[in-house]
Every structure is written in C-alpha cells, then in structure tokens.
Image: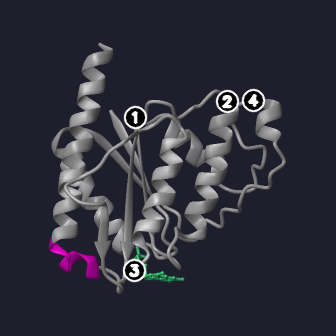
Amino acid sequence: MKVVAFNGSARKDGNCAFLIRRVFQELERENIETELIQLAGAKLHGCRACYGCFQKKNSRCQFDDDQLNDYLAKILESHSLILASPTYFSDVSPEMKALIDRVGFVARANNNLLARKAGAAIVTVRRAGAIHALDTLNHFFLCQSMFLVGSSYWNIGFGREKGEVEKDEEGLKTMAVLGQNLAWLLKKIAAFQK
Ligand SMILES: Cc1cc2nc3c(=O)[nH]c(=O)nc-3n(C[C@H](O)[C@H](O)[C@H](O)COP(=O)(O)O)c2cc1C
C-alpha cells in the first residue's frame, strides 16, 4: 500500500512538510509506504483549458513541458493522496491549484481515474482563511469519487515561520489521528478487496 503526499507550499520543508511528515509517522508504523513530493520550485503551469485530455483520453495532460504527468503517474500508482497547502489569501497556493485543476481534469476525462482512492487534505495557516483553503481541497476530492479522511478536528496546523507549526500541539495531535484514520481505512479497503 502506498500514500503519496504533495506539499503545495512555495516554501520547501516548511509547516506543510512538517505536518505531512507527522501523518507519515503513523502510516509508516503500519508499514504503509509513503512518498513526499514538494511543489516548491516546480514551475507547474495551470490548466490551459484545451480539452485535449477529453479528446485523447490517454490518461495524460497533453502538455509535457512540466512535471504534471510524472505527478499524475505517482498519484495513479498510490492508494491514497494527501494534498497539503499553506493558506494564501484564504485559499490554496497557486502550485496546488495548478496541480488539482490539471490532475482533476485528466482524471475526469478518463472515467474518474481517482475514484475510490482515499483523500486527505492538510492546511497550514498563520491566522485565518484555512477553512476556505481546506474546503477547496475537500471539494476536489468530493467530485473525484474519492473517500475523504478526517480527524479529531479539522486538518489544520497554525504557524507562520518555517517549523513554527511544531508548537501547535492540537494541530500535531490532529495529524496523528489523521494518519491513524487513514491507515485504518486503507487496511479495511485492502482486506475487503482480497
Ligand atoms: C502569499 C502568502 C499569503 C498568505 N496568506 C495568508 C492568509 O490568508 N491567512 C493566514 O493566516 N496566513 C497567510 N499566509 C501565511 C501562511 O499560510 C503560513 O505562513 C503557513 O504556515 C505557511 O506554510 P508553509 O511553511 O508550508 O509554507 C500567507 C503567506 C503567504 C506567503
């Protein structure tokens, strides 16, 4: 079983990465393979609305000028997708928006490629706007026929400077429970499919 996580922050190894790694600890304890992909510096462009994916239906974005198709392949080989974003003006980062728009369109053009994978959203924030960013990610999962994973509180961690989220005790607890819930769900699905 494998879980891939995307850190949508423009800042590598910041608060989003810290929270993802906290979730990974729980998954790895259950022998679930994990992979973290950080979008910082990736220069992903947004969807160009060419509808080429709906015409070709080859499970790819027809633009091969950035890493989108590599990212999509990582998602398709995984049982679960974690999307983590910092709050930027009460929404997700542009890197994350580019990822979800393009992956989402290709997935829908090809008979819902993400259907029945588990999805978990994580958001970091200094002060306000996190719920709206979280809703953006959850709405993505919900229209891809995915199963949403929650926790003991909303999947949010507080902090501004890199690593500051480490002081958010409740946020860390939320991530631990999120990891446990995700591991539980993946194991149940795997057992059901046997
Ligand atoms: C362009 C930009 C916009 C931001 N907008 C908000 C915001 O709307 N609300 C907020 O509380 N924090 C905002 N922040 C702060 C980040 O959400 C916060 O520092 C977060 O922990 C960054 O996560 P990271 O370390 O993973 O990049 C903003 C930061 C940047 C760079």
Q: Amino acid under label 1?
A: His
Q: Which residues are magenta?
A: 164-169
Disc 4 Cβ-to-ligand 1 distance below 8 Å:
no
Q: Which residue has dot 2 on it? A: 110
Q: Amino acid under label 2?
A: Asn
Other-residue count near label 2 (Cα within 10 Å), few / some / many at <14 / 14–19 / ≥20: some
Per the picture, the main secondary structure of the magenta-coloured stretch is helix
Q: Which residue has dot 1 on it? A: 79
User: Marks 1 and 2, Cα distance to the nearest angstrom?
Assistant: 18 Å
Q: Amino acid under label 3?
A: Ala
User: Marks 3 and 1, Cα distance to the nearest angstrom?
Assistant: 32 Å
Q: Nearer the viewer, residue 109 or 35?
A: 109
Q: Look at discs 1 and 2 and give the one toward the viewer.
A: 2
Element assignment for label 2? loop
Determine if the magenta segment contains residue 168: yes
Residue at 36% in and 83% down: 127
Which tag, 3 or 4, sits closer to the chain's start?
A: 4
User: Marks 2 and 3, Cα distance to the nearest angstrom?
Assistant: 37 Å
Disc 3 Cβ-to-ligand 1 distance below 8 Å:
yes
Of the four image quadrants, the one with ligand 1 is bottom left
Residue at 29% in and 13% down: 194
Check whether the beta carbons of the residues at disc 2 and disc 4 lie within 8 A of each other. yes
- In the rendered image of this protein, does residue 164 appear above or below residue 154? below
The number of discs equals 4
Q: Tell me the tag on residue 57.
A: 4
Which tag, 2 or 4, sits closer to the chain's start?
A: 4
Left or right: 26 in relation to 114: left
Name the image quarter holding residue 73: top right
Element assignment for label 3? loop
Residue at 40% in and 34% down: 79
